[in-house]
Amino acid sequence: MERSGELVGFPLLMSWSSGYKACTIPYRLPSDDPTKATDTELSWIHVFMNSIPSFTKRAETDHTLPDAPSRAQIFAHRYTEILEDLKKDPKTHGGPPDGILLCRLREQVLRELGFTDIFKKVKDEENAKAMALFEDVVQLNDAIEDEAKRMENLVKGIFAGNLFDLGSAQLAELFSRDGISFLASCQNLLPRPWVIDDLESFITKWSRKSWKKVVIFVDNSGADIILGILPFTRELLRHGTQVILAANDLPSINDVTYPELVEIISKLKDEHGKLVGVDTSNLLVANSGNDLPVIDLTRVSQELAYLASDADLVILEGMGRGIETNLYAQFRCDSLKIGMILVDITSKNTAESGLRLLVCYEAFLSNAIVNIMSSLVQRFKSKEALPMSMSQGGGGGGVRKRLSSLSLRMNMRTREQPIHSSWEYGDNSIRKWWDWGLGWIMSKKLTFAKDLEMSEEEKAVLGCNSKGTWIHVFYKVRSELRRLVRQQCRSASNLPL
């Protein structure tokens, strides 16, 4: 569907996540000097500075402009000046800088100079190569009889395809020097467990065939979309799932655009409109309204918002969408963020390079638990609602410190510790009555929680008979709180690589 009208918020963003910001990396803290660039900002400015030569080279070979070489040099000069300005004063050019602003400024300079798609040639070439391999890759996956192993192989295919990311200076250099082989990349992926590895949980949910509609925010052209995402999409279609592929409105780096994706799928279908024997009537391609390699989910097209409103799984693929901007985004449905963090490339073997793989799967909590979490989060935002002592000076730590303290005190496995220290001196009979009464309440089955899923960890800790009880509900809440606490802690440092 074509994009029309103004951009709107993605309807599946969690309502109690009102503090959503399309930024995973803590570029600066409230205590940082607003007039000076932080170390994190400087390091990312350096990353974007390093990408200028590869972008300039692509721009010089843009045959749509007769004076492309001279314009390319102007681009390099202007963008370098902007980055230098941000180093000196982070408030310039709409700062302080983050991933979205740095990408936006780069695209703005390119478009002002008349460059609309400097990666068009390489995208077309890689699309043609990948389409020639599509059927073989699909057949290799189909030959895997074990459903769990087949899904794992499909996810690995997404990782292998995602290496075709020319927004990274190092990957762009590797691609221009040696090219990137999809099958070789599959074989050379880092062994599990990965940095974040929720693949088993995802596959367990997948085996129940529980998703009716899935939205996938896609990333790159070439092997990424054709040999990674589309075989994965085809597997979803085989199971009767409706799939919406959300692609960029305008070109940015080598990301696939909506018109390009429509054309790719059209070429891959046979005369009966099938993808290697699988019906595609449940496959839709949507214009996301985005024009960057990262995405702010408060700004998507109205068409995508309408199509996605009743989806029960959201997938964000790639470093830009899934990690840099939305790793901590919370949704009203299940979500999967899958991508790679690039630290340094020294070898074609990812096991020896700086690629770190992430599969972050989060199951949606029932509405009742969401309401509980909403209340808890709102209370945690208030100083009065957090009975955690402040530092002696009254200033240190704030909510982040109190949440970190809370995480150390909330451990449901160690039940020997009483809720209040004064209970240690209380009447023994009262304590027995309390323990009995609390145990009885916690073991009650709840109507609203009867369909609440129970993970293998929960079964081991709580026992299978605890499914749908108060203790099961509170265990889920505790797990969600701990995850929120980890997010708060991560915001004070870089990602846990």
Image (cartoon, grey):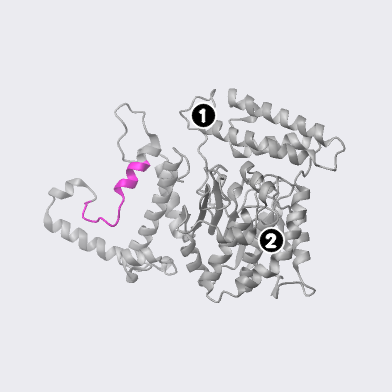
Q: Is residue 319 left or right of residue 384?
A: right
User: Which badge, 1 or 2, is on the more N-terminal residue?
Assistant: 1
Q: Is residue 241 visible?
A: no
Q: Is residue 77 left or right of residue 157?
A: right
Where residue 63 sits, quadrant-wise, is: top right
Residue at the spot of label 2: 226
Q: Is residue 1 magenta?
A: no
Task: State the quadrant of the N terminus.
Answer: bottom right
Which residue is drawn at the image coordinates 74% and 57% (left, top)? 127
Q: Amino acid at mark 1?
A: Thr
Q: Amino acid at mark 2?
A: Ile
How far across and how far down the image is residue 316, in percent? 59, 54
Residue at the spot of label 1: 38
Q: Residue furthest right?
A: 66
Q: Is residue 417 left or right of residue 350?
A: left
Sort mark 2 into few (<14), some (14-19) or many (20+) by Cα contacts within 10 Å. Answer: many
Front residue (pair 289, 379)? 289
Helix, strand or loop at label 2? It is: helix
How far across and how far down the image is residue 312, in percent? 57, 63
Which residue is drawn at the image coordinates 71% and 63% (left, top)? 284
Which residue is drawn at the image coordinates 45% and 38% (left, top)? 493
- The part of the chain drawn in magenta is 403-418
**Pointer 1 with pointer 2, Cβ within 8 A:** no
Helix, strand or loop at label 1? It is: loop
The span from disc 1 to disc 2 (Cα, nearest Å) is: 39 Å
As drawn, 473 above or below 173 = below
Sort mark 1 into few (<14), some (14-19) or many (20+) by Cα contacts within 10 Å. Answer: some
Q: Tell me how many marks there are.
A: 2
Q: Is residue 17 visible?
A: yes
How far across and how far down the image is residue 48, in percent? 63, 36
Front residue (pair 414, 15)? 414
